[in-house]
Image (tube, helix red, strand yellow):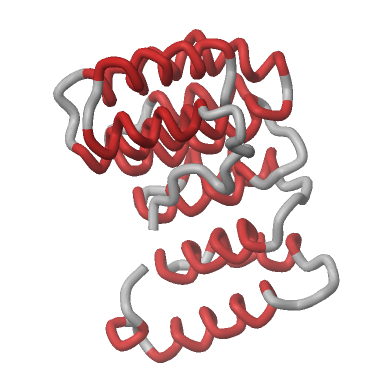
Amino acid sequence: MSTTANVPPSARARIAVVRAIGGAAREVEDVLALYLDDELPDVREAAALAIAARGPARLGPRLLAQIGREPEPSVRSALYMALAEQVGFNVRAATDLACAESNVATRLAGFAALAAEAARHPAAAAIFDYEVVPELATRVLGEDDRKNALAAVSILAFAMTIASRRTLRTVARRIEGDIGAAARAALAPRNKRPGAPFQAH
């Protein structure tokens, strides 16, 4: 998100409203969702992040539709973060959207949302293992950069599906440095499930 100083005054006011609503105690996700159609990307991103911060809700269909029409990669990344917190969503549709992302950070944010659902539901885990894990493995074991490789390890560790564990074991054996260490830490018996996977912001 742009710094507040770079945002027009009218947008700053709307962002302040979104943040205030997001911190409210009662259920206000439907109100926050109205701001996902704001004319300014910074406001849409703030709304998505506020929805993500509020935790479990039932906005999956709304968020998937929004991801499909949102032009800004940074806003889509925030929408994927919000999607990860929803109580169930259409994994097939989310996988298709994430796999269509050309922006690497946004693509990984989509994979992180899928990892969250894979950790909760076996049916989602099967799709994740078949369609997402091979790419994450390539990002870690191939020629991808360190930041993306660490993000991929984090996503695999969060999902902890059958294929995720297999890939993490391979990474732990073959990769040195902080990437291999992250994989070994994820596989340690004492290790509890990590918190939120890869954050795009």
Q: Is residue 93 left or right of residue 170?
A: right
Residue 170, x across and y down, in percent: 36, 13
Which quarter of the figure has residue 139? top left
Horizontally, is 88 left or right of 38 in the view?
A: right
Image location (x, y in percent) of residue 84 = 61, 42
Foreground pick, 23 / 187: 187
Quick check: 130 above or below 27? above
Q: Position of residue 192 (x, y in %)?
A: 63, 39
Q: Give me the residue at 21% from left, 38% from top.
A: 146
Between 131 and 68, the one lying in front of the other is 131
Q: Look at 65% across and 30% down and name the residue there.
A: 117
Question: As drawn, which residue projects farthest toward the left?
Answer: 143
Q: Which residue corresponds to the image point at 45% horizontal and 19% vertical from the top-left?
A: 132
Q: Is residue 28 above or below residue 179?
A: below
Residue 118, position as x, y percentages in the image: 63, 25
Q: Nearer the viewer, residue 154 or 72?
A: 154
